[in-house]
Amino acid sequence: MTLCVMGASAQKFENLAMTPPMGWNSWNKFACDVSEQLIMETADAMAASGMKAAGYEYVVIDDCWQVGRDSMGFIVADPVRFPSGIKALADYVHSKGLKFGIYSCAGTETCGGRPGSRGHEFQDAYMYAQWGVDYLKFDWCKTDGQNAVESYRLMSQKLKEAGRPIVFSLCEWGDNKPWNWGKEIGHLWRTTGDIYDCFDCEKNHGTWSNWGVMRILDMQDGLREYAGPGHWNDPDMLEVGNGGLSLNEARAHFSMWCMLAAPLIAGNDLRNMNAETLSILTNADAIAINQDPIGVQGLKVDAVDGLETWVKPLSNGEWAICFLNRSAEPKTISYDWKTKVVKDEFAKRELNGASQQYNIKDVWTKKSLGNTQKTLKATIPSHDVLMVKLSK
């Protein structure tokens, strides 16, 4: 008998996540309080609320679904919280026309103190394939002495060997600069520590911190060249609808994640969201900017007195522009398209209102704002955005 072993050249599944993944994850809202009932009800809500129609497809259960390993070393789900088993749960999510995601960790234990995958990588990958998993978030707790590149490469290889195409999300927090090496191993990689449900704050835990939306945004500086179809910078999941952000701030948060070509992974309770939260999460024009097929991450081109200007090249010669007001006061803009020439060296594109006329659409009000022949004048409320799409 000849045993075929995949060598070190084995890489991730190709042609997955060609636009930033869209879905939902349990951690931000529920942490360890997860169950099959929650996941099933969330899948129901995603399908019925308009989220699925807007492009959200992954239902991802984060930490604390697992309680141990059996005598053979295979991972065991919590029999009280998941009495039907993970395969049945994945089948249910699939029955809604959605995809199922799960969580593990490269270390000996997960961040929630459950069994990690270290030493059991192929067993876990095999089980995920058997269960019908479509997405794996792989964390970085309890990894003393481990090499991040090799640990993530190993799991990527084992997923490939198990044979089921699975989107591989590297949750390494940016400590080992995964943008430098993640492209061949996974489909997205966290660039920072965990997000926190506030606009601009730090929650210090002593040896580590959670970061507010604006702090996370600032940490994306210099990373845009590493992102593209099938390999995305991940500034962490959305906090829209969790109560820590005002309506303006939630709209700004979502807008900037769209400009960043970031994964759009909702982190709220989809079963109990108000109309304002749903309208933000399902804004078709904002999502189209995020999901644009050329996959170029946005670029900050100006920042004056708390007002930032971001641009994102889109397909068909179009552009998205986002004016972000980070200050505590409203800001008035007077933007002359003919003099504000933007040269994007990375995308090899130029936005020049003097040589090319564009029509302007407000992404949030859906109103036409004329064209680039005229100076754009507007007042942007505190902690809010004016986000527009320019089309020829």
Image (cartoon, helix red, strand yellow):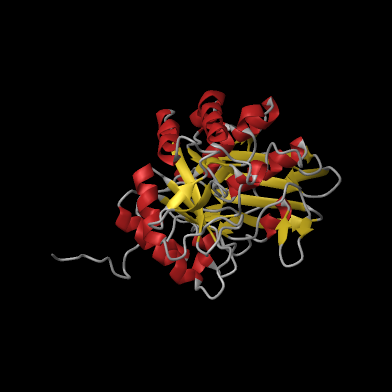
Decide if residue 124 is on the left or right side of residue 138: left
- Quarter of the N terminus within the rendering: bottom left
**Residue 268 x/y as whole percent:** 65, 38
Number of numbered discs on residues: 0
**Residue 129 x/y as whole percent:** 35, 48
Check the image and name the residue furthest to the top. Answer: 48
Decide if residue 381 is on the left or right side of residue 85: right
Q: Front-most of 29 and 14?
A: 29
Check the image and name the residue furthest to the right. Answer: 329
Which residue sits at x=30%, y=58%?
161
Which residue sits at x=51%, y=73%?
146
Q: Front-most of 151 and 168?
A: 151
Q: Front-most of 306 and 76?
A: 76
**Residue 345 x/y as whole percent:** 53, 62
**Residue 23 x/y as whole percent:** 52, 40
Residue 353: tell me if it is visible.
no
Q: Is 86 drawn above or below residue 341 in the view shown?
A: above
Q: Front-most of 326 and 90?
A: 90
Decide if residue 229 is on the left or right side of residue 33: left
Check the image and name the residue furthest to the front. Answer: 71
Check the image and name the residue furthest to the bottom. Answer: 145
Splitting the image into 4 quarters, where does residue 385 fall? top right
Which residue sits at x=76%, y=48%?
199
Residue 206: tell me if it is visible.
yes
Splitting the image into 4 quarters, where does residue 109 fall? bottom right
